Amino acid sequence: MNTSSLHDPLAAEYVLGTLHGGARARFVQRLRDDALLEAQVVYWERALMPMAAHLSAVPSPQVWTAIAERIALRQSVVAKPGWIERWFGVRSLAPLAAGLVLGVALTVNGPRLLDSGGADRADGAETQLPESYVGVLAGANGRAGLIVSSRRHGTLMDIKQVQPVAVGAGQTLFLWAIEADGSTYAIGAVPQGKFVQVKLPKTSEQLFGKATELAISLEAVGAAPAAPSVPFVYRGLCGKLWRVAAPKN
Amino acid sequence: MATGQPRVASAEFAPAAYVESGLGVLIARVVLRDQAAFKRLYDATSHCLLGIIVRMLRDRAWAEEVLQEAYIALWHAAPTYSAAKAQPMTWLMTIARYKALDALRSTRTERQHVLRPAPAADDEDDDSGPPDVADERRGPLEQLVQAVESAQLRHCLQALESSQRQAISLAFYDGLTHAELATHMQQPLGTVKAWVRRGLERLKPCLERCAAEPRHAP
């Protein structure tokens, strides 16, 4: 990008590394709210980093071992209490997940709270939506990628693909359920499309009763894999949208 | 397991673009907490990032600690990566460089390690391995600049006055501050500050000229 009319020498010195101490801290502060300044930093990063492209040193094997241990440790630590984080996998997505859950809760409870004096409202009143399983699955960039919903005791599932992924020839999207212990089980292939409806082999309750997450991978057309053969392209919460907790199976 | 294992989206990428696009795909997988993809990203890029860090820190063990911190940071920062803003490798290199700068700044006293001899050259590329900074007038720092793979950047660096080029190279490759540059180059602080600033000011129009007229670039 052409930033010649917006030249801020501090941007170049920040990237070079000569900006330090208080000056650097003040610059970083400005950088948070100033998109033009950030663009200049990006310009200089792109301009100067090729200076280092030919440097090379082979790390000892212990470096990766240490990194892998720290990642695994962190994932096992957050697995129990941090369910939102674990479902979405990253801390930065937790607000999104919390917002989704909160949004759902308010949608369900809001009208009832406003109508709490209504004579025709008994305990266990109906929710706005029928008892359903819902999933908002994140795509690779962390944003909502695909939304699924199905009635709790129904056998049809709606799939809205918010953010499409490239599906190669001979491949298909393939839906998985993930249990709390991380084990996956196959649900089946699902077609591409902005909004499609598929017939489930069993009721949602039978298929997703134990699921805490849903995910989609790309598999070979006609394959019946026991486990995903490639990383997931979408992954997210499997929400149970009814007032009474699902019976523990 | 089915026969004919699918390969994710590989058909999208022309072979020439695959390496860089491949890193982008790996980063996208890392966002989905794919540890195997993270290992592949590490295997493809760690030698370059360690080269940057080891050159700046001049201490192999310390550099490997910082490399570890850089990849942990990458694991967490992957969702913030924007392909629209930076090539994957540029982004990875900036994270490594800022980590190395933080490490230098956090332990700075008099930075005795700056003038310490380089570690034993046990790296792949002994030729361009970390040279002794004190010797850069006799060549090694200049050799680093001459080895820059981008012809445009190399041309623009070589078009600078040698004092400007030396100040910028020392700051970039060795992470020296203005004060350290002044000590190291045995010049007043104001002089080296001006060299850095003017050098960067001259670099920019040169790079933009080269980008605008690639045919005329060397």
Image (cartoon, coloured by chain):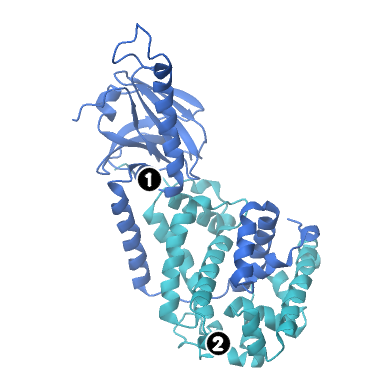
The amino acid on which the numbered mark 2 sits, given as a three-letter code, is Pro
Residue furthest to the front in view is A117
Picture quarter containing residue A104? top left
Question: Can you identify the residue that label 1 sits on?
Answer: A85
Image point (32%, 22%), residue name: A242
The dot on residue B206 is none
Chain coloured blue here: A
Image point (26%, 27%), residue name: A245
The quarter of the rendered structure image containing the C terminus of chain A is top left
Foreground pick, A118 / B214: A118
Chain coloured cyan here: B
The amino acid on which the numbered mark 1 sits, given as a three-letter code, is Glu
Image point (70%, 71%), residue name: B153
Q: Looking at the picture, how far across and down is residue A236, in whole percent?
A: 39, 38
Q: Is residue A93 above or below residue B152?
A: above
How far separated are the C-alphas under marks 2 and 1? 45 Å
Does residue A223 show up? Answer: no
Secondary structure, mark 2, is loop
Image point (35%, 6%), residue name: A119
Picture quarter containing residue B16? bottom right
Q: Looking at the picture, how far across and down is residue A135, in whole percent?
A: 39, 31
Secondary structure, mark 1, is helix
Foreground pick, B3 / A242: A242
Q: Which of label 2 and label 1 is nearer to you?
A: 1
Q: Looking at the picture, how far across and down is residue A109, in whole percent?
A: 39, 22
Question: Can you identify the residue that label 2 sits on?
Answer: B131
